[in-house]
Amino acid sequence: MLASDLTIALLIHLQAWEILLLSVGVCIGIGGLLLTRRLFPHLSAGENNVVATVMATAVATIFAVLAGFVVVTLYTTSESATQATHQETGALLDVYRESTAMSFELATTIQADVLSYSKLVAADEFPAMARGGSSRQAEDAASQIFTDLAAFQPTTQAQSDLMQEALSQYDTFLQARRTRLALAESSLPGMLWLSIIASAGLTIAFSWFFGQDRLRAQLFMTGGVAALVGIMLFLIVVLNHPFTGDYSVSSLPFTEILRSG
């Protein structure tokens, strides 16, 4: 929970490029290399390079596999959130289209319900999801659509068929809404965050124990490794919450409904 709250705070209060600079800056940790060379001056001769290479390779491989798995998983989650949002709005519009073929009065009512729901989601629920929450008002508006739709009594077989199709589309809409809200609340568990940070820290720390006569060259190489680690951590932070930050899922499908209404 603490890690989730921290990443949400970063995504809300900082822009993506600022988070990138912060991640890379924290990971570079040049002071750690300087301190290591001062405490263990014999390392500059390279006498521990063979052992350090084996250990660093093992730790770096673990970090790379773990970070790569997390990034791919979070990216897939973000794509799923985008698809759920588009599926939700698509099904919502289908409910309205089906209602127009049943009755003018029903179509007018459902149109007002759809516009009210879309406005609440775009203006209220998406900002709430950015903080891991949802909107009770939007939930009530979603229920109102079903209430008004179910109150209509078909008088012909054609209307009955259209009603069944509209109810089916409403079920699709509701499932997509639930998926969107569930993905908004999802985040990496604390133990996984601990594993990522520990493996990242060890990957950087092991690079300090390689021997190199020229300090400038070692600073450059160590900084490069640390920068790559920082970039991976940046990607994890940015993708951890699909509805928060500069690269979050957009509410544009709902605002387009409002414009068309």
Image (cartoon, rainbow, N blue to C red):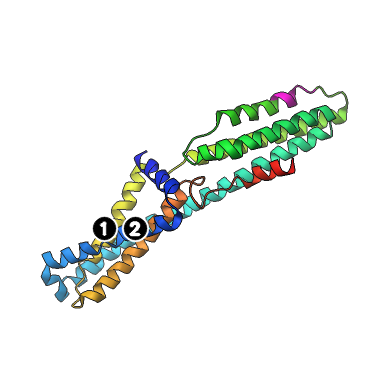
Counting from the top left corner in percent of width and height, residue 21 is at: 38, 59
Distance from disc 1 to disc 2, alpha carbons, whole Å, reads 9 Å
Q: Is residue 143 above or below residue 202?
A: above
**Quadrant including the C terminus:** top right
Q: Quadrant of residue 35?
A: bottom left
Whether tag 1 and tag 2 are in contact, CB under 8 A, the answer is yes
Counting from the top left corner in percent of width and height, residue 125 is at: 56, 36
Type of amino acid under label 2: Phe
N-terminal of the two: label 1 or label 2? Answer: 2
Secondary structure mainly formed by the magenta segment: helix
Q: Is residue 101 above or below residue 211?
A: above
232 falls in the magenta region: no
Looking at the rendered structure, the secondary structure element under dot 2 is helix
Which residue bears the numbered disc 1? 202
Badge number at residue 76: none
Q: Residue at x 13, y 67 (%)?
A: 38
Taking the image as drawn, is residue 174 in sight?
Answer: yes
Type of amino acid under label 1: Leu
- In the picture as drawn, the residue positioned furthest to the right comes out as 156
Q: Residue at x 56, y 48 (%)?
A: 249
Q: Residues within 10 Å of mark 1 (few under 14, many from 20)?
A: some
Counting from the top left corner in percent of width and height, residue 12 is at: 45, 46
Looking at the rendered structure, the secondary structure element under dot 1 is helix
Which residue bears the numbered disc 2? 63
Q: Residues within 10 Å of mark 2 (few under 14, many from 20)?
A: many
**Quadrant including the N terminus:** top left
Q: Is residue 94 left or right of residue 11?
A: right
Specify start and end residues of the magenta stretch as a single range.
147-152
Q: Is residue 253 above or below residue 224?
A: above
